[in-house]
Image (cartoon, rainbow, N blue to C red):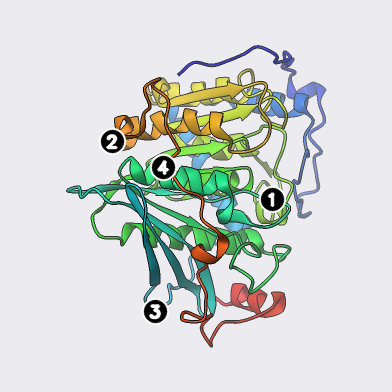
Amino acid sequence: MHRILSGICPVVFLCLSSISLRAQPESQTVLCQGSFFSEAQGAAFLQAHVPGGLAAWQLRSAEIAGHVRAGMQLLSLPARPGTAPVIHSRKVMNGYSVENVFFETLPGFYLTGNLYRPLKPQPAYAGILCPHGHDDKQEGRFREQTQKRCATLARMGAVVFSWDMVGYGDSRQCTHTLEKALKLQTINSIRALDFLLAQPGVDSNRIGITGESGGGTQAFLLTALDPRIRVSVPVVMISAHFFGGCTCESGMPIHHQGSFQTDNAEIAALTAPRPLLMISDGDDWTKNTPLVEYPFMQQIYALFGQTGHVQNVHLPKDKHDYGPSKRQAMYPFMAKYLGLDLKAVLDQNGLVDEGPSVTLGQGALAAFNDKYPLPANAVMGNEQVARLLETP
């Protein structure tokens, strides 16, 4: 896939001995938030952590995964509630359908979302998870950029599930500022994957995930922790120096514990050797991807003999979103590795035509309504939801 490198400032790789990486006492808990590293520090950290061989990387990746789980207090997963998902209000569109969904991920906490399915019958379907990013209005999955990609992927032959961040859309049992939002959203991501795999005809060997910004964080974290994800496309998020600016990304100590330190680029590298597309732009913390994070990722994939499985599409004039140009880059990658029908959505110029993918109003996509209200056992408020997260 073509990489556009114009407009990128060179990054000088410096040795760690010349840069302070904010060493902390062994006993101190450190939250690595926002631009915790400078750009130079992030580049130096990755350079210092290029493994000497596959065995070294396997040890390092196991260490990273273990610390991430420990940092988000998920060394073991809470039991899955036994209640059945509620799927309702099916709407038949042009080449796909969309339904409204809610189900319990913890006793009394409900994940809310939409399920997109292709209308054309197939022997088996790829499945794609579509977490969304942050936005000022907290519209989440209702935003045009989210609906467009979900519907278009369904038109290509995938069963697609998009769900709310906590405090967004229909998910109003707590606010997005919940102290352990990272833990809750990771549980939700795992249960969203369980739900997707339970849909009729979904092929467990053809599962992908793609999201932007905070949804990109959810994408690379779930991919790092769950091998059931086979293809990953985190958009405008993977960075060596930026650790996520929200509680739901870096509000728990997943990056630093005692003498252990990692960053989001290393965590995302746990995707290897599974196919990974990094989409970056010139207006945020991914502006250096072609010169910093992507070369590091290529070295990790080279250990597996799979450098062709990692790609970077860099859009130097783009901004921080999941806009049309980024979606145009994602569709062929998903089609290639998940066996989707890209030709079904191409126009005469060879571009993906998103026109038939309709943006619906929030009312049409709402998980809860008069006929399907929020269940009576729903816990309400940050304090009550936090108690759920403390339950062994």
* Closer to the camera in the image, 101 or 231: 101
Visible residue check, residue 279: yes
Compared with 371, 9 (above or below) is: above
In this rendering, position of residue 258 left or right of residue 81: right
Which of disc 2 and disc 3 is earlier in sequence?
3
The amino acid type of the residue labelled 1 equals: Asp
Residue depicted at x 69% and y 29%: 45
Which residue is under mark 4?
Answer: 356
Q: CA distance from mark 1 to mark 4?
A: 25 Å
Circle 1 SS class: loop
Q: Residues within 10 Å of mark 2 (few under 14, many from 20)?
A: some
* Closer to the camera in the image, 323 or 73: 323
Q: CA distance from mark 2 to mark 4?
A: 21 Å
In this rendering, position of residue 197 left or right of residue 353: left
Residue 83 numbered mark, or none: 3
Could you tell me residue 371's position as x and y percent?
46, 81
Which of disc 1 and disc 2 is earlier in sequence?
1
Q: Is there a contact, CB below 8 Å, between mark 2 and mark 4?
A: no
Q: Of the residues tagged 2 and 1, which is closer to the observer?
A: 1
Q: Write down the quadrant of residue 384 in the picture.
A: bottom right
Which of disc 4 and disc 1 is earlier in sequence?
1
Q: Is there a contact, CB below 8 Å, between mark 3 and mark 1?
A: no
Which of disc 1 and disc 3 is earlier in sequence?
3
The amino acid type of the residue labelled 4 equals: Pro
Which of disc 3 and disc 4 is earlier in sequence?
3
Residue 339 numbered mark, or none: 2
Which residue is under mark 1?
Answer: 135
Visible residue check, residue 75: no
The amino acid type of the residue labelled 3 equals: Thr
Which of disc 4 and disc 2 is earlier in sequence?
2
